[in-house]
Image (cartoon, coloured by chain):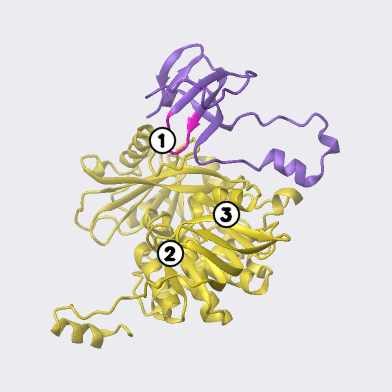
Amino acid sequence: MRYSIFSLARNAFGHHEGWPAAWRSPEPKQSYDVVIVGGGGHGLATAYYLAALHGIRDVAVIEKGWLGGGNTGRNTTIIRSNYLWDESAHLYEHSLKLYEGLSRELNFNIMLSQRGVLNLAHNLHDLRELSRRVNAIRLNGIDSEVLTPVQIKAMVPILDTSPDVRYPVLGASLQRRGGVARHDAVAWGFARGADARGVDVIQNCEVTGIRQRNGAVEGVETSRGYIRARKVGVVVAGHASVLAAMAGFRLPIESHPLQALVSEPIKPIHHSVVMSNAVHVYVSQSDKGELVIGAGIDGYDSYAQRGSFPVIEDQMGALVELFPIFSRLKMLRHWAGIVDTCPDASPIISKTPVKHLYFNCGWGTGGFKATPGSGWVFAHTIAHDAPHALNAAFTLDRFSTGALIDEHGAAAVAH
Amino acid sequence: MLLIECPWCGPREESEFHCGGEAHIVRPLHPEQLSDPEWADYLFMRSNPKGPHRERWVHEAGCGRWFNVERDTVTHEITAVYRMGGPPPNPSAAPGRKR
């Protein structure tokens, strides 16, 4: 069913009781051309683009929980493409461009709001790095500009830009095309689009093993039986190392909790996205009025989807330092996602030592903004058994060759 | 918040410590003889297990000394604390130290 003003009106007369399910919940078949492990945004986007662009429709997405219940539903929904290095800039910009047309393409409102993303500088070094980054980004044809404190104050009046604070705001980079989107809608829109093109979206089905023969993948053992597959794409964020262990190799990844919070809802007061790497907090306001607040990872390895309170305390300290007006807000909910951090803070979208087994991981704390682009290049990699030019540099091999894409301290906020 | 028992200072709260990642990664004796993939394995590859994990911690805001911890990455329960250079404990024999 196509969603439109007319379908909305028609269903309003039926008290909204007649909406069909947005996707089927089929039993898994015995075999597929391609099995995608992981029903988050990236996995669903991969399946969608496999079907929509590469004509591969005999595809299953296997999810151990529910769609978008992992990091897709746990991130702070920020979208930007302000990366220093060319490889990253092109990949994230491709994703941002896909986001810009995504609601129309999927016939599903992902509520993209390009309200501008500000990255603050708090010392002279920050400011120089930021100016260099803005210039590099502009050379790649991506919108980016440097703001002075006066311009920042005009754009975000509630931000404390006074010069006598512990971490004064000396400037900011601004990407006006950056912003936020509804994270659940991204997963649901891709699921619906993939389902309509014949992809089986299978929830509550956990992969417990990866079968191989003669160095090539044969299929996956799951909690609902064995499923044969000609090709398998694994895109499971924090559990990437667990799946790699099933396939018999290791990854340069450590899994960490990344915590986030939302405040009680308040009237619209914060109309952009403000990020600060130095005091480390980032905040936007959702359509419901809640402040959505994130920060850095907890320092230890974990699969627990919860973190430690000192990290939250630091985050709140940074928030109140920047926005004194928020000091009396109550926090409503708090959670963590398990992020797959890579030594060079860049993802791995790659072939693996096992033939026809592909991994897409290592997005760390920055995966949501890349969802459509990640799925787009991963679908290409699986369909052609070779990477696209956009992800050719993001191989697993780069840790042997030394061609790292080091975004630590180079990106606006490294992940 | 983890309560971590420093072998020298006793139990202190997590914020006094810094986690140094996976323990028992031995520096190759003859690095010049390693192939690139072997060197990458030493430098970058990690086991990153879901479950018991042996890792290094440093009592940064205390005595400043490093030590090893065996901790479950799902429950966060610390099952053993032992000194640098010491043999890793047998997980099944290690006394469970409840937080």
Estimate the x, y position of residue A399 in percent, counting from the top left. Answer: 70, 49
Q: Does residue B4 lie above or below A59 as drawn?
A: above
Estimate the x, y position of residue A329 in percent, counting from the top left. Answer: 21, 43
Q: Is residue A173 magenta?
A: no
Numbered tag placed on residue A133 in the rendering:
3
Q: Does residue A357 lie above or below B34 as drawn?
A: below
Asked whether the residues under the numbered discs 3 and 1 touch, taking CB atoms below 8 Å apart as contact, a structural biologist would say: no
Estimate the x, y position of residue A332 in percent, counting from the top left. Answer: 23, 46
Circle 2 crowding by C-alpha within 10 Å: few under 14, some 14–19, many from 20:
some
Chain bearing tag 3 is A
Location of mark 2 (residue): A176
**Camera-side residue of A31 and A36:** A31
Q: Amino acid at mark 3?
A: Arg
Q: Which residues are magenta?
A: B71-77
The hue used for chain A is yellow
Q: Amino acid at mark 2?
A: Arg
Numbered tag placed on residue B75 in the rendering:
1
**Camera-side residue of B95 and B63:** B95
